[in-house]
Image (cartoon, rainbow, N blue to C red):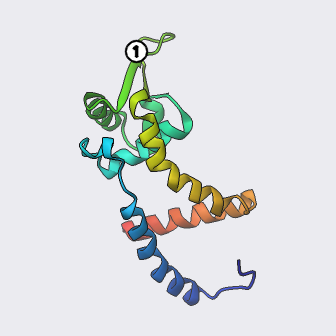
Amino acid sequence: MSTGGLSVDDGIRTLLLLMPRLVGRAKRLKVPEELQALSLAPRHLSLLAYLLFDGSMTVNELAARLEVAPATVSLMVGELSRKGVLDRREDDADRRRTIVSIADRHQDAINEWLGYGAKAWRQALQPLTPEQRRLFVDTLLAYERAVSG
């Protein structure tokens, strides 16, 4: 890893070349065969990633993390539940709340599929200090906001 400085223009040039390669590699990640018939959309990936890495949670918790309305998450959860990807159950402590988890029969396939990216991110982020990781994540979020208009 380089320790020298980088001008803004050199950084832009590097990232303009890097981003299409990253997107291309992400698109080539093969969806496990048992999940291909389920027609999972990109909007499902973040929801599945949260459940995979953080475990079961409520619809409201998922909505807060995904930064969308609970109704949107309820629709996605309903769709994925009907396909057998997710399990829903009532919260024993509060029957108004629904706890969502990845169905056991799909846990391994989803872990194989999404775990590859998580492993790569862990390898890239591990050597950084917590402050450097925060700067990196904040920079990506700022880029996302900028390209979103």
Coordinates of residue 122 in the picture (x, y in percent): 63, 56
Q: Residue 57, relative to residue 125: is it above or below? A: above
Q: Residue 128, relative to residue 33: is it above or below? A: below
Regarding mark 1 in the picture, which secondary structure is present there? loop
What is the count of numbered marks? 1
Spot the residue most to the front.
Answer: 33
**Which residue is the site of mark 1?**
96
Which part of the image, by quadrant, shows the N terminus? bottom right
Residue at image location 46% in from the left, 38% down from the top: 108
Q: Nearer the viewer, residue 33 or 26?
A: 33
Residue at image location 53% in from the left, 65% down from the top: 140
Coordinates of residue 69 in the picture (x, y in percent): 36, 38
Crowding at dot 1, Cα within 10 Å, few <14 / some 14-19 / many 20+, comes out as few
- Looking at the image, can residue 103 be seen? no
Q: Is residue 40 left or right of residue 122?
A: left
Q: Residue 35, relative to residue 59: is it above or below? A: below
Coordinates of residue 50 in the picture (x, y in percent): 49, 41
Type of amino acid at the residue the image marks with label 1? Arg
Residue 135 in which image quadrant: bottom right
Q: Residue 78, relative to residue 72: is it above or below? A: above
Q: Is residue 134 left or right of residue 38?
A: right
Residue at image location 46% in from the left, 81% down from the top: 16
Coordinates of residue 20 in the picture (x, y in percent): 41, 75
Residue at image location 57% in from the left, 67% down from the top: 139
Which part of the image, by quadrant, shows the C terminus? bottom left
Q: Nearer the viewer, residue 139 or 115?
A: 115
Q: Nearer the viewer, residue 31 or 57?
A: 31
